[in-house]
Amino acid sequence: MEVAAMTALLPHFDTAVVAEWPPGTFVENLAPGGRGRWLVTLPSHRRVDVVQPDGAHRPLVELPHPATGIAPVPGGALVLTGPLGEAGWRLLRVGSEAGVQEVCELPDLRFGNGVAWAGDELLVADSALGAVFAVDPGSGRARVWLHHELLARQDPRSPFPGVNGVSVHAGQVHLTSTDRGLLLRCPVDAANPAAEVEVVATGVCGDDLAATDDGALWIATHTGDSVVRRLPGGELQEVAGVRQGAAGATAVAVDPEAPDVLYATTNGGMTRPRGRAPGPGRLLRISPRVR
């Protein structure tokens, strides 16, 4: 375990704004939609938008409650939606052809947040309960997969989430615990995941995150207004900051069509504006600089 120490902004990445939404738009999470498109959740507007490769975007579905976590499936995505902090959560399937279909109700959830595939199950972070659920979309069954004190808010009155982002890669589940500023991991196939939770780093106020084949983790820091890369050795490097449009960075995802390219969502810094007016919500593309 180490306390994260940030290095200077990396010069060998370029960040481009793909799409923008008006200030006050909370762009929360993203999933590839095929053919260069991206599906993004907008809990502030209770909808899911589709973004074309040229940046044009439009509402795909409008919902009665905020949409948060999203995971790709053929022809669309699975989306979490529900009233924040209350019962009434559901998992929906959305797509350009089939519209909206309910997959299952999730009556035990209170604040569904980050999601990630683990085989045929979807791991779902509950930021209010400090737990990770495993949901089988085929049967609709859900069970608590991981419950641990480090996933809960340190102060129950804190406005910041407990467990938040989930990433599954190379046999490991990585989690952010936002209020505690922790990066955690445990084996995806652990018989008792709670017994194998390991603190990887402290001082990382992470939101959602993604992993790449080189062992790096890419973390949206939300109130840190940045996207950072954590190398396998523990070094933390800022990849994009406020000047690159990453104010209020909320999530990161790898482009399945170009694995060295990442996309990130932002809310324009509306959660903690730091004395400035919130900017637009954005979809960013982060790519290696061509030398």
Image (cartoon, helix red, strand yellow):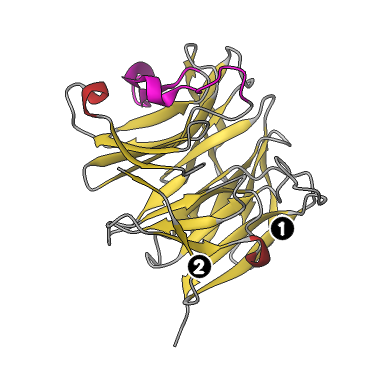
Q: Which amino acid, mark 2? A: Ala
> Marks 2/1: CA distance?
26 Å
Image quadrant in which the N terminus is located: top left
Note whether residue 214 is visible: yes
Residue 140: x and y, percent? 39, 19
Residue 134: x and y, percent? 34, 24
Q: Is residue 259 left or right of residue 163?
A: left
Q: Is residue 88 one of those drawn in magenta?
A: no
Q: In the image as oriented, which residue stretches furthest toward the bottom?
A: 291
Residue 123: x and y, percent? 37, 30
The residue closer to the viewer here, 224 or 5, is: 5
> Helix or strand or loop: what does disc 1 sit on?
strand
- Which residue is label 1 attached to? 20
- Which residue is label 2 attached to? 8
- Between discs 2 and 1, the one toward the N terminus: 2
**Residue at x 57% of width, y 12% of height:** 87
**Residue at x 63% of width, y 66% of height:** 244
**Label placed on residue 105:** none
The residue closer to the viewer here, 219 or 181, is: 181
Q: Is residue 86 above or below residue 269?
A: above
Q: Is residue 133 one of those drawn in magenta?
A: yes
Q: Is residue 286 above or below residue 291?
A: above
Q: Which residues are magenta?
A: 129-158
Residue 58: x and y, percent? 70, 51
